[in-house]
C-alpha cells in the first residue's frame, strides 16, 4: 500500500521558509507583492485565483488582481500589462492563460520583466530552465512536483523517470528539472509507441497528460513512485487525476492523489517565486 504524498504537508513545510525570507524583505521595507492578471471569468482561473490569494495571505505576501474584460482589445491589454510590469511595487506577475482567442500572448511574453516572470512565460526563463540555470523561474507546477518529491525524501538522482506529457508548462520543463537533478528521463506523448511498458519501467512516473485515469495499475511498476499532475473530471464530473488511483495505490510505494496532491503545492511555489523576485529586484539575492 503506497504512502500518500499530500500537498498540504508540503505546503506547510514550505510556509516557514517563505515567511522567514519574507520577513527579511520586510526588514528592508519591502512588501513582496504578486499581481494576477485575469481576463474574463473562467471558472478554472477563478478557482486558482482563490487558492493563490489565500496562499499569499498565509505567507505575508500582498496579492492584487487586475481584472480585465473578456472583450478587451490587444492594444488595451498590452497597455494594462505594461503598467503592471512597470509598477515598482509589484514583484511577481501571473497572467492566466490561455487568453481569449482574439488576443495574442506573444507580445507580453516578450515584454514581461524576466525578474517578475514568476510562472515562466518568457523565453528568457524557459531558456534558463533548459540550460539548467537556476537563477530564473521554472513553471510553478513543474517545480511543485520536485518540491513534493524532495519533501518526501525521494532523491531522483540516478532514477529512471518517465514523464507522460510534453507541454511547455508541465512535461518538458519538468523533464529538465529532473535532468538537472541527475535523473535519467524519458518523455512520453501521444505518439509514444510503447507507453505502457515505458511507464512500467520507471522508478518515478509523472503523469501530466490531462487524460482522466489513463494510467492504469498495469502501467505502474511494483514499488514505483507516482506523481499525478492531471486535473480532469471523471464520468460523474468529479475531479480526478491522470492515474487510476485505487489500483495504483496497491502497486506504488508513494503516490500523490488528485485533489490534495501536486495542485496544492503549486501556489506555495508561486509564493516562493514572488519572494525570490522581490529579493532579486531589491538586489538582496
Ligand atoms: P497539454 O494538453 O498542453 O499537454 C498534454 C500532454 O500530454 C501533451 O504533450 C500530449 O501529447 C500528452 N498526452 C495527452 N494524451 C496522451 C496520451 N493518451 N498518451 C500519451 N500522452 C498524452 O496539458 P498541460 O501540460 O497543460 O496539462 C497537463 C495536465 O496537468 C492537465 O490535466 C492540466 O489540467 C494539469 N495541470 C495541472 C496544474 C496543477 O497546478 N496541478 C497546472 C497545469 C496543468 P502530444 O504533445 O503528443 O499532444
Image: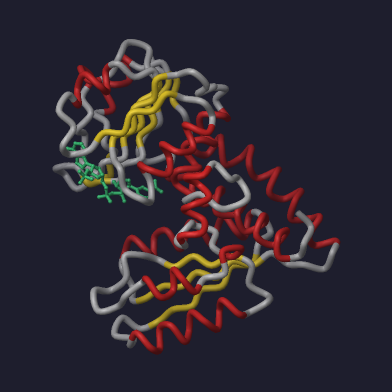
User: In the image, what residue occupies the spot 38% across and 51% down?
Assistant: 169
- List x then y, in percent, for residue 143: 50, 42
User: In the image, what residue occupies the spot 31% across and 40% down?
Assistant: 208
Relative height, residue 132 to residue 21 (above, below) = above
Front residue of 67/192: it is 192
Residue 135 visible from this viewpoint: yes
- List x then y, in percent, for residue 101: 23, 74
Front residue of 152/276: it is 276
**Residue found at the far right of this picture:** 27
**Residue found at the far top of this picture:** 222
- List x then y, in percent, for residue 195: 19, 26
- List x then y, in percent, for residue 51: 48, 56
Q: Quadrant of ligand 1?
A: top left
- The reply, left or right, for residue 86 in relation to residue 72 is right
User: In the image, what residue occupies the spot 36% across and 17% down?
Assistant: 252
Relative height, residue 26 to residue 150 (above, below) = below
Amino acid at each position: 500500500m503506497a504512502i500518500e504524498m499530500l500537498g498540504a504537508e508540503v505546503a506547510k513545510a514550505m510556509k516557514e521558509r517563505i515567511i522567514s525570507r519574507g520577513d527579511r524583505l520586510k526588514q528592508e521595507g519591502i512588501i513582496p507583492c504578486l499581481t494576477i492578471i485575469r481576463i474574463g471569468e473562467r471558472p478554472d482561473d477563478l478557482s486558482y485565483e482563490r487558492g493563490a490569494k489565500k496562499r499569499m495571505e498565509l505567507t505575508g505576501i500582498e496579492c492584487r488582481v487586475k481584472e480585465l474584460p473578456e472583450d478587451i482589445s490587444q492594444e488595451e491589454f498590452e497597455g494594462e500589462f505594461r503598467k503592471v510590469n512597470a509598477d515598482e511595487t509589484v514583484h511577481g506577475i501571473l497572467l492566466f492563460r490561455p487568453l481569449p482567442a482574439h488576443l495574442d500572448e506573444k507580445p507580453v511574453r516578450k515584454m514581461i520583466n524576466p525578474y517578475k516572470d514568476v510562472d515562466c512565460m518568457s523565453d528568457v526563463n524557459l531558456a534558463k530552465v533548459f540550460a539548467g540555470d537556476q537563477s530564473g523561474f521554472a513553471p510553478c507546477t513543474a517545480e511543485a512536483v520536485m518540491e513534493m518529491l524532495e519533501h518526501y525524501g525521494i532523491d531522483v538522482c540516478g532514477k529512471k523517470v518517465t514523464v507522460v506529457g510534453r507541454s511547455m508548462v508541465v512535461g518538458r520543463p519538468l523533464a529538465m528539472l529532473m535532468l538537472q537533478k541527475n535523473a535519467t528521463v524519458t518523455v512520453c506523448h501521444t505518439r509514444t509507441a510503447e507507453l505502457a511498458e515505458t511507464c512500467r519501467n520507471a522508478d518515478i512516473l509523472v503523469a501530466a497528460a490531462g487524460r482522466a485515469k489513463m494510467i492504469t495499475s498495469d502501467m505502474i511498476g511494483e514499488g514505483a513512485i507516482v506523481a499525478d499532475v492531471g486535473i480532469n473530471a471523471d464520468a460523474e464530473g468529479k475531479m480526478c487525476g491522470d492515474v487510476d488511483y485505487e489500483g495504483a495505490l496497491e502497486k506504488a510505494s508513494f503516490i500523490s492523489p488528485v485533489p490534495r496532491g501536486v495542485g496544492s503545492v503549486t501556489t506555495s511555489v508561486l509564493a516562493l517565486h514572488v519572494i525570490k523576485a522581490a529579493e532579486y529586484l531589491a538586489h538582496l539575492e
